[in-house]
Amino acid sequence: MLQIGLGNPRPGVRDRRCNRKLILIPMPRRELELLKDNFYHIFNRGNYKSTIFFSDRDYGRFLDKLRSYKDEFNVEIISFSLLPNHFHLLAKPRSDDGIQNLMKNLLSSHSHYL
């Protein structure tokens, strides 16, 4: 589940912070236009709050993949926090589809690793 934090608006309601009409789709994630050079809080948690990092090696591998994918997809990672069952990222994309590609590859890689 990828959630990109801009509050929790109702479908079709304008977000006062960016003056854009938000379109929500009936899936665990919402469609949100991610604009380059803006800051986004991204967080992800294991299913049913289950553990996603079991050892120091898991944390290290996740950070190595994050470093390589952030360069590949041109996303600046401002800060991060990794906890046993979830993580937070503060990211600034430098391209239009940077965050989507970064998260798709990072989460796919980590889930196949586990």
Image (tube, rainbow, N blue to C red):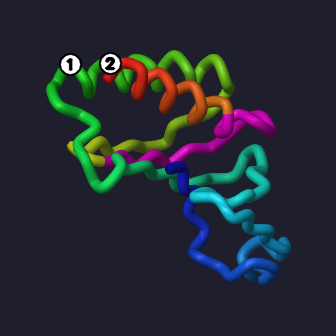
Q: Which residues are magenta?
A: 86-100
Q: Secondary structure at mark 1?
A: helix
Q: Is residue 18 above or below residue 63?
A: below
Residue 4: x and y in percent read 58, 57
Q: Secondary structure at mark 2?
A: helix
Image point (62%, 53%), residue name = 39
Q: Is residue 43 above or below residue 17?
A: above
Image point (83%, 76%), residue name = 19
Sort mark 1 into few (<14), some (14-19) or many (20+) by Cα contacts within 10 Å. few
Name the residue at the left extreme: 55
Does residue 12 appear to the left or right of 43 in the view shown? right
Nearest to the observer: residue 95 or residue 24: 24
Residue 108: x and y in percent read 51, 27
| Tag 1 near tag 2, CB within 8 Å | yes
Does residue 89 appear to the left or right of 28 in the view shown? left
Image point (64%, 59%), residue name = 27
Number of the label disc, if any, that sits on residue 57: 1
Task: Provide the residue designation for mark 2.
Answer: 61
Task: Please tell me in which quadrant of the rendered image residue 81 appears.
Answer: top left
Residue 91: say if magenta.
yes
Q: Amino acid at mark 1?
A: Arg
Q: Is residue 103 above or below residue 9?
A: above
Nearest to the observer: residue 46 or residue 13: 46
**Count of marks, rendered view:** 2
Image point (73%, 63%), residue name = 25
